[in-house]
Structures are given as C-alpha cells and as structure tokens.
C-alpha cells in the first residue's frame, strides 16, 4: 500500500476507532493506538514498516505541535507560583521510579549499566497521550495543573539523568587513550548541548514566532506561521543533533511569555490539530510490536511494576508532603503511567551507543511501552473523572476499569 493510501486509511480508521471507544468510555487516544496496532505490521500489515518510515516526518511534526502546547505550562506568572511544587512532585515520582527499577534489575542479576539505563528511562512520562486525554475531557483544576506541570518538567529530568548515566558508563569504561579531562568533556558535553542548545534554539524560534504573530490576524495565516515555525524548529534540532522535544517545549514557553496574543494562538492550534494527533497515535500504535510483550521476561515485569509503583507512590508522597488537595494526593499517580516517545527515542540512542547493552534494554522498554500506552490513557482519564475535573460523572468510570487490559 502506498503512503497516501496509508495516510487516508489512518485518518479514517482513527475517526472510526475514536467513535467506537466512546461506547465503552475509554479515551480516544486509546482507540487511535488500537487502530494503529490493527493496521500495523504486527496484525493486519496494511500499513507496512516501509510506510511507517515514510510517514515518520508527520509524527515528528505532530509531536512538535504537542510539545509546543505543553510548553505553555511554563508561563512565567504561573510557574513562579507553582514551579517549585511541580519540581518537587517530579523529583519524588521520578526518583522513586528510577531507584526501584534500578535496584530491581540489579536484583535479578543484570549488569549495573543495564539497570542504570532502565532506571533512567523509567522516569519518562508521555506528554502526548496525557495532554490529549486532558483536552478530550476538557479538564480544569488542581490535578490537571499539577499533571501538566509534571509532564513538562519530567522529560527534561529524564534527558538529564540519562545523559549523566551515559557519562558514568563512558567514564567507567576507560579513557580511550585520552586524558581524564577529555573523557569528562566527551561525557558531559552532550548534556549541556542537548539541554542548553535545544533551549536556545527553541527560544530563538519562539522570539521569531512572537514577533511575527503581531503581523498576522487571519486563522489561516496563524496556522501557516505556527506550522512553519515548528517544522523549522524540529528540522534544525535534528540537523544540529539537538533534542526536538526540548526545543519544541522552549518555543511554547517563549511564546506564552512574550506574545500578548499567545492565548489566541494556542486556542487556534487546539482547534485545528486533531488530524495530527490522530496520525501521531495511529502511527505510534502501528509501531508497537505486541509480540515483544511475552518475551520481556522477569526483568520486563520488574520494569513495568517497578515503574508503575514508583510513580504512583512517589506522586502520593510528594503531594502529601506539599499538603496538596486530597484529590491530587489520591489520583495524581494514576495520571503518570503513560510512556512512549522519549523512552523509544532513548532506546534508539542506546542502540547506537552501547551495542552490548541494547538488546535487553530495547526489548524491555519497547514491550513496556506497549503496555503503558494501552493502560496510561485509561488511567489518566480515570484520575481526571474521579477528581471531578471534567464534565463526566465519576460513576461512568466503571466502563474505564472494565476496559483495562
């Protein structure tokens, strides 16, 4: 099947799946992922691996637009008020998940390098599926605010921890014939480049977008400006070996703080990007290989249950420590289960960097992503409904629980 036919099929089946899953009261994003699994190589094969490679650029654009929206959480007035709270919550849930996974993997007999890499990846929480569930439920309230704040900070922390783990592994493997200073430089520079360089790129693109936005008024022009800016940002990030995730977040953060019309721009984007969301999640579903789930073994179970337990208990402990609202304490952990894009991206980086460790890490993470991408959106919706931050009634959540895999 050619790429255009595949793309049309993806959109039409995403629409159909989105309507069907509403009958059993589970999130649309779960329907999109299920549609992708059905279409992809692991089931029907109507969308082939070659089609997925050709359509990858659309996924990149969609993820850039999603992270641009998440970047609006960094509004200065809001972050000055709640930023420390977001940071504390992120640290408690992330550190506990990383520690439990690392210790668990060591306990079942794997090298410390594998344990540390899996622990670092366990930190990542998927911003895309979480944001889509929030938007689908039209959620507002303290739980929603804390959830969005955590997913904005969480992935920055994950990249930082992964880079530090990689630096430690590199230093532990020897100096490679150079001095200690050369080794430290080679180990630490990627962290500075990935974070500072990506943030600088996003800031520059955000400046351009904020300045140009004062000259456009029509909806069509606004969309052209937004799409062009995000495409340019993601493309340059790849060209310079930067993080498109961090750069896109920085564009949104810059935009929301510098442009007086930023709210109108974000509202315009939210009304026109559903096709990109559908494409992104259907392709993500098609990329999932369900055959990996039974093969992940004991270490995979340690990763899945260790990560879930760590994030849930860490979120509860952090919320209680900060004396947040009862609903935040009770349900925040349920909103942190999803895991996808960044975790997969880090496995690709590990394949390129650590050939001896990549087989076990890749198998475990990709199998776990298949689990978390199915359970995560349902769990997030459960939390938002039970907290009373949507227009849905808590009694309807029984359908969500019945739908859990």
Image: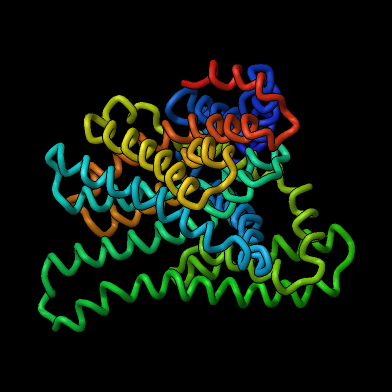
- x 66%, y 56%: residue: 69
Quarter of the image with the N terminus in it: top right
Can residue 97 be seen here? yes
Q: Position of residue 270 (x, y in %)?
A: 74, 49
| Residue sitting nearer the eye, 308 or 208 | 308
How are the colours assigned in the image? rainbow
| Residue sitting nearer the eye, 74 or 15 | 74
Can residue 21 be seen here? no
Q: Position of residue 9 (x, y in %)?
A: 64, 31
Q: Position of residue 103 (x, y in %)?
A: 21, 45
| The furthest residue to the right | 218
Quadrant in which residue 175 is drawn:
bottom left
Q: Is residue 37 above or below residue 132?
A: above
Q: How many marks?
A: 0
- x 66%, y 20%: residue: 396
Quadrant in which residue 327 is drawn:
top right
Q: Position of residue 294 (x, y in %)?
A: 30, 25
| Residue sitting nearer the eye, 117 or 215 | 117
Image side of residue 248 versus residue 267, left or right = left
Image side of residue 39 versus residue 217, left or right = left
Image side of residue 194 versus residue 214, left or right = left
- x 80%, y 54%: residue: 268
Q: Is residue 77 above or below residue 117?
A: below
- x 38%, y 64%: residue: 160
């Amino acid at each position: 099947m050619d790429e255009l036919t595949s793309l049309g099929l993806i959109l039409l089946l995403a629409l159909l799946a989105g309507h069907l899953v509403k009958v059993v009261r589970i999130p649309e994003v779960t329907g999109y992922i299920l549609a992708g699994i059905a279409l992809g190589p692991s089931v029907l094969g109507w969308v082939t691996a070659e089609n997925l490679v050709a359509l990858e650029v659309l996924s990149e654009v969609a993820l850039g637009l999603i992270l641009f929206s998440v970047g609006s959480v960094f509004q200065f007035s809001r972050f000055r008020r709640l930023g420390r709270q977001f940071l504390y919550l992120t640290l408690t849930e992330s550190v506990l998940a990383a520690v439990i996974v690392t210790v668990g993997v060591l306990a079942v007999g794997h090298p410390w390098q594998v344990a540390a890499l899996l622990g670092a990846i366990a930190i990542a929480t998927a911003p895309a599926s979480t944001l889509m569930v929030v938007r689908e439920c039209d959620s507002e309230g303290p739980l929603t605010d804390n959830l969005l704040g955590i997913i904005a900070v969480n992935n920055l922390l994950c990249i930082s921890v992964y880079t530090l783990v990689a630096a430690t592994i590199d230093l532990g493997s020897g100096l490679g014939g150079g001095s200690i200073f050369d080794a430290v430089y080679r180990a630490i520079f990627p962290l500075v480049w990935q974070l500072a360089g990506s943030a600088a790129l996003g800031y520059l693109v955000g400046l351009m977008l904020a300045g140009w936005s004062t000259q456009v008024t029509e909806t069509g022009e606004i969309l052209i400006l937004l799409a062009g800016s995000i495409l340019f940002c993601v493309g340059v990030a790849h060209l310079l070996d930067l993080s498109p995730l961090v750069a896109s977040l920085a564009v949104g953060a810059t935009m929301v703080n510098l442009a007086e019309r930023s709210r109108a721009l974000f509202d315009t984007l939210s009304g026109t990007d559903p096709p990109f969301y559908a494409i992104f999640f259907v392709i993500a579903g098609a990329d999932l290989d369900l055959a990996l789930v039974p093969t992940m073994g004991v270490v995979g179970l340690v990763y899945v249950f260790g990560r879930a337990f760590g994030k849930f208990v860490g979120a509860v402990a952090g919320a209680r420590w900060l004396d947040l609202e009862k609903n935040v304490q009770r349900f925040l952990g349920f909103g942190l289960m999803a895991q996808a894009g960044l975790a997969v991206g880090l496995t690709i980086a590990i394949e390129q960097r650590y050939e001896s460790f990549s087989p076990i890490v890749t198998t475990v993470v990709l199998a776990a992503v298949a689990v978390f991408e199915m359970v995560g959106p349902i769990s997030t919706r459960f939390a938002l409904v039970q907290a009373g931050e949507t227009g849905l009634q808590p009694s309807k959540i029984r359908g969500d629980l019945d739908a859990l895999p």
